[in-house]
Amino acid sequence: MGQNRPKADVIQLTLPSKAEYLGVARLTVSGIANRMGFSYDEIEDIKLAVGEACTNVVRHAYKETENPCSIHIQCHVYEDRLVIEVSDQGVGFSNELIAEQLMPIYAGKNLEDLDEGGLGLYLIHTLMDEVEIRSESGVVVSMTKYVRQDGVAGNDWTISEAEI
């Protein structure tokens, strides 16, 4: 409690674990990332990573239960980074599955032979700056993308505003 942790704005979204709602998750994080000043390519990377994490929930987390299911998304907006946590209360991953999915392109397999979403965790690790996977009462995929400080990201003004 005595730690001086940086303050973050937190945006939470809960969606049914159905493929037709994945676009809502991507649009939400896209809007947040755009507001933070991420570049177009960075926003596309973030959207793809979140889409993959949500697809993993839809495809794997609830396959052994009939209960109504949800995807929980929390976006923690810091001054220098965006941390997105995608979680579920499903069956989780085995450690062997996680290790296999993190291997470069599933060593020995051709890209054409992989199912849609088959690059899942490997792709998320490639697109984001930091990724942490925790198995709690389900799985939490925590993804961090840092705002670049090279003068491109982080400016809210446009060229036309600068000329005024």
Image (cartoon, helix red, strand yellow):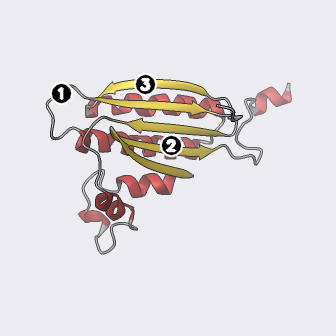
Q: Name the secondary structure under disc 2.
A: helix
Horizontal relation, residue 136 to residue 38: left or right: left
Q: Mark 3 = which residue?
A: 13
Around disc 1, counting alpha carbons within 10 Å, would you say few (fewer than 14), some (14 to 19), or many (20 or more)?
few
129, above or below 23, in the image:
below
Around disc 3, counting alpha carbons within 10 Å, would you say few (fewer than 14), some (14 to 19), or many (20 or more)?
some
Q: CA distance from mark 2 to mark 3?
A: 16 Å
Q: Residue furthest front?
A: 2
Q: Nearer the viewer, mark 1 or mark 3?
A: 1
Q: Amino acid at mark 1?
A: Asn
Q: CA distance from mark 1 to mark 3?
A: 19 Å
Q: Quadrant of residue 153?
A: top right
Q: Earlier in the sequence, mark 2 or mark 3?
A: 3
Q: Nearer the viewer, mark 1 or mark 2?
A: 1
Q: Point out residue 43 in the picture as x, y percentages from the top left corner.
A: 54, 41
Q: Mark 2 = which residue?
A: 46
Q: Quadrant of residue 107?
A: bottom left
Q: CA distance from mark 1 to mark 2?
A: 30 Å
Q: Mark 1 = which residue?
A: 67
Horizontal relation, residue 137 to residue 62: left or right: right
Q: Name the secondary structure under disc 3.
A: strand
Quadrant in which the N terminus appears? top right
Name the residue at 43% across, 24% down: 13
